């Protein structure tokens, strides 16, 4: 029996594999493309033909008028390399013959292939030993060997399997890991192969001394941002998470976390963290237009750190046709600052939707945290002083101290262009006359959205919201606590906040309760464009018995811009199809 221990040479630095096709350098690919010589392969399947071409020497030295001697040397070398490419695909008995021909006044190479029967794997022996043998990562790899008995011996799964073992060992700190055996034994006569991979993880290294170079936070606050602890087991994911935490703090323009495993002593790897401060102040400005809001100008300023404790200030203002506002927030990071903080805010907001106006001043304090499941949770106390005026009526003033809580979670497969995902948010708040308030009120809101891409690549979007308020008199409620429907983010086909209870003069004054729902379907057209059709329904009402859902229908187009999805819609109310409304928006679906 002729026995070839292919694995011993396959592991060498110069050993070719099917990866050669996918790992050509740009220079090599460009050189082949520059040659006018065409290559055709006959007698081989698509994957084998592509791999044979990948193993060919570069065509850069061949031209239409290359001398016969040069062409002959190239063919001799190419046939040898292409046989290696055939073996990498499991065809050890393949024959390759290259014939030069004249085609369209230029040299062309016709490759005739007789692949023969492929070699198939009859035995796979995979063993993982060492300190890491019981870790889930290694167990998962070992449970999925590169081949099953009877499969064709394509070399790439073998290389991928070894790469996965080596990468996992490095990521988990098994820097002394080694292969005790790694070979493929091939018998070309019987077209059979045995694969053997024995991998010893060795011992696992641990985190050594952690040093941090930065000049913003004091040591007490800095420790709250550091998750690496001396003595912990080494894990690249933990190191990357540490980098993300510091980058997400908004204090630094660049963060480098370097593990110096070459300097490891007694099984401990020292870690150096270098964080360069960003500019302390940043400013934003925006000129925009919204169907509901009209032309608006927005400006903002952020102070990314006020002191060595990492406190922050954010200020923003907006001036538009329907609304003007200003707000400043003072934010204090807490014990786990990447997802826990408290803040105090002061703000002013003036709004006018033609039928009802308001002028509100608000002070607030809140506590925010994100739990391990990804829910953003907030408890808050807001003091609200708001003047509300319905056109033609006397203004009413409300002073409320509102205590409340909210929770929200968004889950999607892509932050900018999600194909599947959902959003769920809920809030409850209330005030009582005995607690610095001139009336008692209890209000709850819930919102949900679901997105799903279908088998035909069409996208289905379902969303809805509901709100309810317990209070004695709607007329005494401030506008910011009243419910309205209508507009781009509510019921398209109707003007902004045009749906709700009306007074004797037919002015829309809002409602104690609200209910909205929407169903939308997007169908892909060409490239980054798609068409949409939708139906929206909703109402804001005082008593449940008074609810009468208004329905709007429409169509639109969607474009995947570099900044996110752009939407342009036209919608009409079902009770007056002669009243079209146009909408334009930019932003992700979730």
Image (cartoon, rainbow, N blue to C red):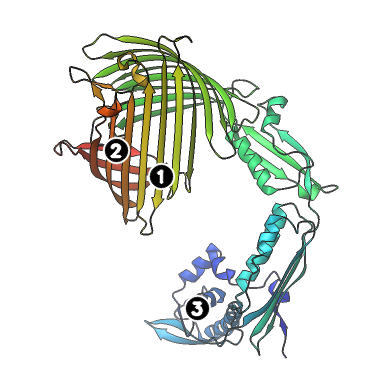
Q: Secondary structure at mark 2?
A: strand
- Where's the C terminus, which quadrant? top left
In front of the other: 279 or 437: 437
Q: Secondary structure at mark 1?
A: strand
Seen at 76% across and 56% down, the residue is 132
- Where's the N terminus, which quadrant? bottom right
Residues tagged 2 and 1 counted as in contact (Cβ below 8 A): no
The answer for how far apart the CA atoms under marks 2 and 1 are is 21 Å
Crowd around label 2: few <14 · some 14–19 · many ≥20 (10 Å): some
Crowd around label 3: few <14 · some 14–19 · many ≥20 (10 Å): some
Crowd around label 1: few <14 · some 14–19 · many ≥20 (10 Å): some
Decide if residue 563 is in sight here.
no
- Residue at the disc numbered 2: 584
Q: Of circles 2 and 1, which is in front? A: 1
- Residue at the disc numbered 3: 49
Q: Left or right: 91 with respect to 326?
A: right
Residues tagged 3 and 1 counted as in contact (Cβ below 8 A): no
Image x and y of residue 332, in percent: 59, 23
In this picture, is 203 found above or below 371? below
- Residue at the disc numbered 1: 450
The quadrant where residue 255 appears: top right
């Amino acid at each position: 029996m002729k026995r070839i221990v292919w694995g011993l040479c396959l592991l060498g630095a110069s050993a070719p594999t099917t990866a050669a096709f996918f790992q050509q350098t740009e220079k090599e690919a460009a050189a082949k493309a520059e040659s006018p010589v065409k290559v055709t392969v006959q007698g081989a399947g698509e994957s084998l033909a592509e791999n044979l071409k990948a193993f060919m020497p570069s065509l850069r030295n061949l031209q239409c008028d290359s001398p016969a001697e040069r062409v002959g040397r190239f063919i001799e070398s190419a046939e040898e390399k292409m046989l290696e490419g055939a073996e990498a695909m499991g065809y050890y008995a393949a024959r390759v013959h290259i014939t030069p021909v004249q085609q369209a006044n230029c040299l062309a190479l016709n490759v005739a292939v007789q692949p023969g029967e492929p070699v198939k794997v009859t035995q796979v022996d995979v063993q993982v030993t060492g300190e890491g043998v019981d870790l889930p990562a290694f167990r998962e790899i070992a449970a999925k060997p590169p081949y099953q008995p009877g499969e064709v011996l394509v070399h790439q799964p073998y290389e991928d399997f070894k790469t996965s073992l080596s990468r996992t060992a490095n990521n988990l700190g098994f820097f002394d890991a080694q292969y005790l055996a790694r070979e493929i034994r091939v018998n070309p006569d019987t077209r059979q192969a045995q694969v053997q991979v024995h991998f010893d993880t060795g011992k696992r290294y641990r985190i050594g001394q952690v040093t941090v170079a930065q000049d913003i936070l004091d040591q007490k606050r800095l420790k709250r941002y550091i998750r690496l602890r001396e003595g912990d087991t080494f894990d690249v994911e933990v190191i990357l998470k540490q980098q993300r935490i510091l980058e997400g703090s908004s204090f630094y323009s660049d963060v480098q976390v370097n593990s110096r495993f070459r300097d490891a002593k007694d099984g401990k790897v020292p870690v150096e963290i270098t964080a360069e401060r960003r500019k302390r102040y940043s400013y934003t400005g925006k000129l925009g237009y919204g169907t509901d809001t009209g032309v608006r100008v927005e400006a903002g300023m952020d102070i990314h750190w006020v002191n060595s404790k990492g406190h922050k200030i954010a200020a923003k203002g907006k001036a538009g046709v329907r609304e003007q506002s200003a707000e400043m927030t003072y934010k204090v990071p807490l014990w786990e600052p990447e997802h826990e903080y408290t803040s105090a805010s002061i703000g002013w907001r003036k709004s006018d939707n033609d039928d009802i106006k308001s002028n509100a001043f608000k002070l607030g304090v809140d506590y925010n945290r994100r739990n391990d499941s990804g829910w953003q949770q907030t408890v808050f106390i807001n003091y609200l002083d708001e003047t509300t005026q319905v056109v033609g009526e006397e203004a009413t003033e409300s002073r409320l101290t509102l205590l409340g809580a909210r929770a929200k979670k968004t889950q999607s497969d892509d932050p900018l262009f999600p194909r599947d995902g959902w959003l769920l948010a809920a809030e409850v708040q209330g005030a009582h006359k005995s607690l610095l308030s001139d009336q008692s009120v209890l209000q709850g809101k819930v919102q949900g959205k679901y997105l799903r891409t279908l088998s035909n690549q069409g996208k289905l979007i379902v969303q809805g919201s509901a709100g309810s308020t317990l209070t004695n008199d709607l007329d005494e409620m401030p506008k910011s606590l009243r419910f309205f429907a209508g507009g781009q983010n509510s019921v398209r086909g109707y003007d902004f906040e045009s749906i709700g209870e009306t007074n004797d003069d037919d002015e829309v004054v809002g409602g104690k309760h609200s209910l909205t729902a929407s169903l939308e379907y997007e169908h892909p057209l060409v490239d980054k464009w798609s068409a949409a059709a939708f139906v929206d329904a909703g109402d804001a009402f005082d008593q449940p018995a008074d609810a009468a859902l208004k329905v709007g229908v429409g169509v639109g187009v969607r474009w995947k811009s570099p900044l996110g999805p752009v939407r342009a819609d036209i919608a009409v109310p079902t009770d007056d199809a002669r009243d079209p409304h146009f909408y334009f928006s930019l932003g992700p679906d979730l």
